[in-house]
Image (tube, rainbow, N blue to C red):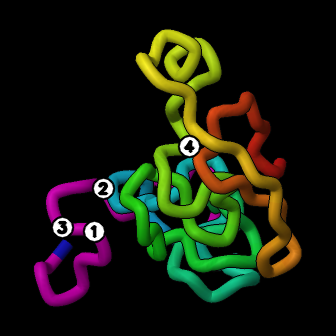
């Protein structure tokens, strides 16, 4: 295929296992339709970590988008076991923010929204 018409350079444009119109070699979300993005965050719905919120916003850098972050300002990936081995416990105060439960300190086991 001429380079000017190549959809996905370096890959076969005719291979599209999920039939979303995006060749497999450039598919952002294999197995799902890359064109569906209900929250307009640039992440296809099938691979959206936090549906309804922008997956790219992560103020505390813990890998959990702000819209689904149960522990704003702290690392959601720290488990209760990790916190139990810490030399001093972290204060816990339940609050509500933007319709999602958060905790200050977050030294509790929490589950992320599905």
Mark 1 or 4, nearer chain start: 1
* Type of secondary structure dominating the magenta stretch: loop
- Residue 10 in the magenta stretch? The answer is yes
CA–CA distance in space, label 2 to label 3: 8 Å
Tell me if mark 3 has few (under 14), some (14-19) or many (20+) residues whose alpha carbon lies within 10 angstroms of its own: some
Q: Residue furthest left?
A: 3
Q: Count up the numbered dots.
A: 4
CA–CA distance in space, label 2 to label 4: 40 Å
Tell me if mark 2 has few (under 14), some (14-19) or many (20+) residues whose alpha carbon lies within 10 angstroms of its own: some
Say left or right for 30 vs 10: right
The residue that disc 1 covers is 8
Q: Which mark is residue 9?
A: 3
Please state the horizontal and vertical placement of residue 70, each as a whole percent of the image: 69, 54
Please tell me which residue lies in front, 60 or 26.
60
The residue that disc 4 covers is 76
Which residue: 48% across, 24% down?
88
Tell me if mark 1 has few (under 14), some (14-19) or many (20+) residues whose alpha carbon lies within 10 angstroms of its own: some
SS for dot 3? loop
SS for dot 1? loop
Please tell me which residue lies in front, 23 or 86.
86
The residue that disc 2 covers is 12
Mark 4 or 3, nearer chain start: 3
Q: Is residue 58 above or below residue 31?
A: below
Say left or right for 28 vs 105: left
Please tell me which residue lies in front, 71 or 1.
71
SS for dot 2? loop
Please tell me which residue lies in front, 42 or 90.
90
Magenta range: 2-20
């Amino acid at each position: 295929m001429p380079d000017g018409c190549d959809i996905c350079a370096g890959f076969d444009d005719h291979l599209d296992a999920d039939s979303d119109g995006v060749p497999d070699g450039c598919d952002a979300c294999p197995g799902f339709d890359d064109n569906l993005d209900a929250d307009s965050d640039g992440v296809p719905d099938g691979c959206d970590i936090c549906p309804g919120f922008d997956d790219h916003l992560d103020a505390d850098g813990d890998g959990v988008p702000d819209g689904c972050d149960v522990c704003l300002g702290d690392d959601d990936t720290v488990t209760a076991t990790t916190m139990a081995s810490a030399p001093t416990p972290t204060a816990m105060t339940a609050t509500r923010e933007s319709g999602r439960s958060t905790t200050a300190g977050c030294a509790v086991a929490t589950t992320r929204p599905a």
